[in-house]
Amino acid sequence: MTRRDNGSAVPYGLLRLSDLINCSMVAFGSFCSQLMNELMQVALHLRDTGDYQELVPDDKAEKVQKWLRLWRLSSVEFELDHVTNSIDRLSKRLNNGAMYRDLEYGFNAIKDALDDGLEGHFIYRYPAHRARILSEWKNDWRAVYTRFPESVNDIRVGVDLWALQHHTASVFHMMRVLEIGLRALAHDLQLSFTIENWQNIVDRIEAAIKQQQKSLPRGEERNSRLQFLGEAAKEFSYFKDGWRNYVSHNKTDYDEHQSRSVMEHVSHFMAILAKGLTVSQAEATGQGLDQTSSDPLQHQAPERSQ
């Protein structure tokens, strides 16, 4: 699991239950079960002895301190400040020579703080059919992000948003993936630009294709090249009129099936585009369409194990 500088896990994507969202459920489950076990042991000890003022022996205090250190890691990760404070207070008592009465009070204080703190936590479970598609995004899109590495963040986020049922947002990110392809196609035709809308770029691409019809030597290679370029330009016009203009200008919303269809079309088309371009990705540089120089695609999101 990739973590940020402050130590908290990045909340992204489909995870194992043990890595759910941004916490370790294994460690947290151990925290809860061991806390109840320690509380039960103290209760049994007090029931058998009836001596609430008995001092906790050093070996028992050392064992509890080890658990407190482990529990504290989980409470900090879950941002359970009251639990952390309760743990610290009990740890301090143990350092100063605590009685079994202090141990019982301390464990109960941790338990109560834990019960209250968990009320504000929300965890999402991906439905099985969505989880399956999300878990396969790397394989499904490999040909695309291998050829267009700057597309990986929008691909990943777009698929994840679909799995989270944010369908219009998913389509928006798929259009950003297409913009990378449009930029690459323009550079493949030796076109340069700064900030322009799709229609202007498509028009310039079509004009460049007509120019190549005149300049390229006749033959099978010319025919294949022109067919590829012509179909790619038509596809971008289709994407622009069918989806991009609507999602970019807040003209419509998308449901599960529509957004899934967009994902499949974009994946299929971008894979074809990746095979047909002649300019290397290193050469296909320049300013993104309708974006500023601080293109967020230049800053890849941290990877997580899947």
Image (cartoon, rainbow, N blue to C red):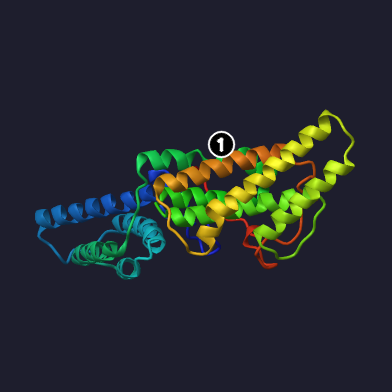
Observer-nearest of 245 and 179: 245
Classify residue 192 by image quadrant.
bottom right
Residue 14 visible in the picture: no
Residue 187 visible in the picture: yes
**In the image, farthest residue toward the top:** 220
The amino acid at mark 1 is Asn
> In the image, is 17 to the left or to the right of 12?
left
Observer-nearest of 282 and 48: 282
Identity of the residue drawn at 67% across and 68% down: 292
Q: Position of residue 208 (x, y in %)?
A: 80, 50
Q: Position of residue 14 (x, y in %)?
A: 44, 46
Observer-nearest of 90 and 115: 115
Q: Position of residue 64 (x, y in %)?
A: 31, 57
> In the image, is 272 to the left or to the right of 64?
right
Which residue in the protein does label 1 denote? 139
Determine whether 88 is above or below 143 in the image.
below
Identity of the residue drawn at 37% across and 46% down: 126
Q: Badge 1: how crowded within 10 Å, few (<14), some, or many (20+)?
A: few
Observer-nearest of 223 and 284: 223
Determine whether 195 is above or below 2 in the image.
below
Identity of the residue drawn at 77% across and 33% down: 224
> In the image, is 21 to the left or to the right of 152?
left
Identity of the residue drawn at 41% across and 59% down: 73
